[in-house]
Image (spheres, grey):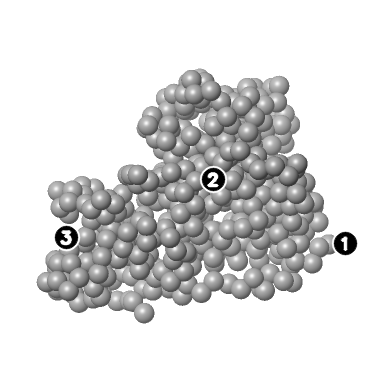
Amino acid sequence: MLSGDVTLRNARVHGTHLGAPVAPLMGAADAGGFYRADIALRGGMIATVTPAAGDAGGCGPSSDLEGPDLEGRIVFPTLVDCHTHLDKGHIWARQPNPDGSFGGALAAVASDSAANWSADDLSARMDFALRCAFAHGTSALRTHIDSQSPQDAISWPVFEQMRATWSGRIDLQGVCLVGIEALRDEAGFAALAQRVKAAGGVLGAVTYMVPDIEALVDRIFVTAMELGLDLDFHADETGDPDAMSLRIIAQAALRRGFGGRVNVGHCCSLSRQPDAEAGRCLDLVAEAGISITTLPMCNLYLQDRRQDGTTPRWRGVTLVHEMRARGIAVAIASDNTRDPFYAYGDLDMIETYRMATRILHLDHPTGDWPAAITDAPARVMGIDAPQIAAGRSADMILFRARSWTELLSRPQSDRIVLRGGAQIDTTLPDYSELDPLMEPSE
């Protein structure tokens, strides 16, 4: 077990995970964007990050501390997951999606929520999910919270309790989640917004192309400005090319001169629109300073799922390369976990990044895409990005892999996670713990 004052010698650290400036201090990066470094830990903090004194079997540590020679193995900072659904998580065993469709997911979750989402049920499933995320190396997480009445009166207090319980291990943020049509009830939405503000949360909604969408989106911006809240939307989670609510969100942000953070998740329909039209939308998004979160695993599962026995024709994800070319911040996140919207997953951001690389072609070159699971989601959340840098907490993940192809070819289930310089127990909770919750209500 690693702990105490040691130097992790001869580590590989990606440039996006090092504190700036990098190149003048660390020499040349390899073809994968990694630098060789000796990382000295003292008192649970990173004391120094210096160029490696030598490769495997080389010249010894670059400080007065002894420690293991990692022989060029990769070290990451801890990870940030900025779009999850802890309240839905792990209900699959009692409420599966009947046909794998988006409509099937909506109906299944509505049924399960009405029947089963008590404070005890939510607490048990949320805690289970957070233990998984923590073991995998996540240190900050944002969850959307289904906030229709009367569920909001149950779910938000549970979230606040979870945030307190997990303080110091995972930094938790909550976002209210309602359909955009809920804003037609001005008094009801005002009350929900006050609840979100009192809980230190983020204002959010799912946008659809309803006839009054522009007025409703404008209303949520006005409310956020009045209360000093950030915004996080689900938008255009469909293959319908006529779904253009991302453009409406960007126009509202510009029209209102919104000064807070705006994040938009999914944006799948962009991939179905003509290039010129999608490009005009992304120009507005860039001008408005909006960040985008792509959810590759859930969207791959739901989008273009066919009920006629034919094969899906598209991947269901958004135009991340076109976004990055315009300077738009793009984060990658887990989304749903073992619920009707996604039958799989474990809040493992390494799995998510591995899948994203394959689905979205985040390679040839890898470039700075690794920042999409550290720096970019931290900016979405308005927190400091995890880094391998002097003066930061010694929170990091050690892998046996020495290159991207090694890292992304295996699940990395033998990773070592350090928090405050001490190795944590990465044993995952057993699914059998949830068995008492999985009997459907009559």
Look at the image and tell me in which quarter the N terminus lies.
Answer: bottom left
* Residue 165 point in image, percent of width and height: 54, 65
The residues tagged by marks 2 and 1 sit, at their Cα atoms, a distance apart of 34 Å
State the residue at coordinates (44%, 40%): 330
Badge 3: residue crowd in 10 Å (few <14, some 14–19, many ≥20): some
Q: What residue type is labelled 2?
A: Leu
Marks 2, 1: nearer the viewer:
2
Mark nearer the N terminus (3 vs 2): 3
Mark nearer the N terminus (2 vs 1): 2
Residue 295 - label: 2
* Residue 382 point in image, percent of width and height: 43, 44
Look at the image and tell me in which quarter the C terminus lies.
Answer: bottom right
Q: Residue furthest right?
A: 442
State the residue at coordinates (18%, 48%): 23
The residues tagged by marks 1 and 3 sit, at their Cα atoms, a distance apart of 63 Å
Mark nearer the N terminus (1 vs 3): 3
Residue 51 - label: 3
Residue 277 vertical placement versus 227 (above, below)? above
Q: Quadrant of residue 40?
A: bottom left
Helix, strand or loop at disc 3? strand
Q: Residue furthest front?
A: 310
Helix, strand or loop at disc 1? loop
Q: Mark 1 points at which residue?
A: 442
Q: Quadrant of residue 339?
A: bottom right
State the residue at coordinates (38%, 29%): 326
Marks 1, 3: nearer the viewer:
3
Q: Which amino acid does label 3 sit on?
A: Pro
* Residue 266 point in image, percent of width and height: 56, 39
12 or 359, nearer to the observer = 359
* Residue 193 point in image, percent of width and height: 62, 39
